[in-house]
Image: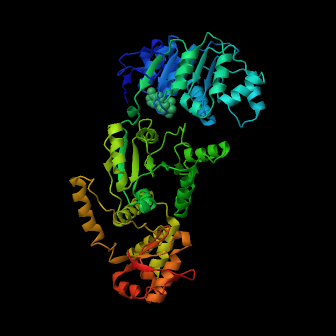
Amino acid sequence: ATGSIKKAHVLQNPARIIYVGRSTMTTKFAQLGLMSQLDQTVSDLGYITPTPIQSEIIPLMLDGHDVIGQAQTGTGKTAAFILPILQTLERGHCGIQALVLTPTRELAMQVAKAADEYGKRLNVRVLAVYGGQPYNLQINRLRQGVDIVVGTPGRLLDLINKRKLDLSSVRTIVLDEADEMLSMGFIEDIEEILSTLPSERQAALFSATIPPTLGSIANKYMHSPKSITIKSKHLTVDAIEHQYCLVNKEDKLAVLTRLFEIEDITSALIFVRTRVGTSDLVNELMGRGFTAEALNSDLKQQTREQVLNRFRRNQITILVATDMAARGLDINDISHVFNYDLPEDPELYVHRVGRTGRAGKTGIAISLLTRKELWRLHRIERFTKQEITRKQIPTAEEIEEHRKTQLLEQMMIWLQRGRCQKELQMVNRLVEIGHDPLQIAAIALKMARREEKQRPIAQISEVQEGRFQNSRHKIKSVERRKGRNGANGFSENGMVRLTLGAGRSHGVRPADVIGTIAYHAKFPGNTIGAISILDKHTLVDVPQQYVEQTLAKSGKYQIHKKAVKLKLA
Ligand code: AMP
């Protein structure tokens, strides 16, 4: 993606800022002045053109300038500062030549890994230092000699104070995600570290925002820095499809699980507003058979890394996170970002969805919102200058059809593969005793589909369409309502939806619902349709022919020995 570069006007002392206005749209790596080993490495990694921040920052840093890059994760900023550092390393030098400060251990590890990767043809020695790891390990590595140290301010300062980290030969210092470091309260540590560095050195600062405190740090510790800003809207590259589903608040979970059925998800990041919300949602999803884990600020660093590794290795497909916990997260293969709760701030939206659609892949961002939140969506659209298109919630029929198609596709693969001698022998035994092969195949499929019964399709209620929507949406939704749900009050397949006045918070289980209704209304429990247990109440589909007798017994129904009301939904 090509981004536009604009003048930075955030810093306090404009005299120190020089606007860099090179046209960068078609710059190639070969034009940046990198040495052949680095050129070769980026091409090995499959990078074709430098990102905007790279084409601006790399030549500047190679020329020895101090730089300020206002850019977020996902813009390629790491390579923008690591490549020039690698190029200017002096071979055979024994001291530390470059120091990178990062707000989190995780980012330190990522940057160190990137430095290792980009420097693989140059035999560089990179070390990440961060709290939570034994000192000895880090001290031993430092003794053996390190060219680039990447670390969090606290641990770096500890090592300096223990006289284990000698920064006297540092020639480049980088502050990565500087605003994050400030908001985490590292300002004093950073200043202390900066003051121990030689005065003749290059400084680079990267930050999504430049708050005033950061401006004054730049003024104090940098020499005529050149400033580059990558507009945040360019983060949401064209490779992201922005969609939203209009939902009723209480149906969010149901809608999410329906989307999981239809969407081709390899890995999903779901954003919720609160820390508690992450655990609640994870529990709900796990209960429905989805492998999800929470990423929130309650997690110890070690656990957090374990969770992230499981996610990277695809052992879990769904990560539920807060904005705080997702900071500095660098995972490239996220196919879907879900906004379970819409962010208040449009910029947060950009930040969240920028986690998908990376490295040349297309990503999908789906926001769940209620009618009342539509205005917020429009605000985000204005901010990102991207249309967010409405996505219809998959209907039960669509999901059933999708399940069938998927099963048939798998069958086709196996049919081509063959390799089912044992099963053929079993079929032969059935044929020998007179069964029809077609019938056998159908029964085998029926048995294969039993697992689906464990995954009932969650019920959702009709969203009351409001005056906000345009006529295109209105026509479509009326058609859908007519075609799919029948007349009002009726749910799918000749069922009528009833509400039972007790829900999850009362410990209701599906068996309780079936038990009490079937017993009192005197009809077979297995004819009861979908049951959706919500927090305070439960939706249950009853065949139309039994509705009258079911409602007639209202007053009789009990769950856990407590009377519960039943009425039309
Ligand atoms: P960053 O903003 O440094 O976290 O980088 C985001 C991702 O983009 C990383 O996974 C890089 O591997 C990738 N990347 C960096 N530069 C390029 C480039 N020029 N072309 C393609 N991918 C890149």
Answer left or right for 495 relative to 352.
Answer: left
Quadrant of the rendering where the C terminus is positioned: bottom left
**Residue 118, percent across and down?**
55, 25
**Residue 479, percent across and down?**
23, 63
Answer left or right for 142 relative to 366.
Answer: right
**Residue 170, percent across and down?**
65, 15
Total numbered circles: 0
Q: Nearer the viewer, residue 511 or 252?
A: 252
Residue 222 visible in image: yes
Quadrant assignment, res 304: top right
Quadrant assignment, res 131: top right
Q: What residue sits 40% from the left and 49% below the top?
A: 366
Q: What residue sits 67% from the left and 21% below the top?
A: 192
Quadrant of the rendering where the N terminus is positioned: top left
**Residue 173, percent across and down?**
60, 19
Question: From what the image shows, is residue 429 above or below residue 483?
Answer: below
Residue 34 visible in image: no
In this picture the colour scheme is rainbow
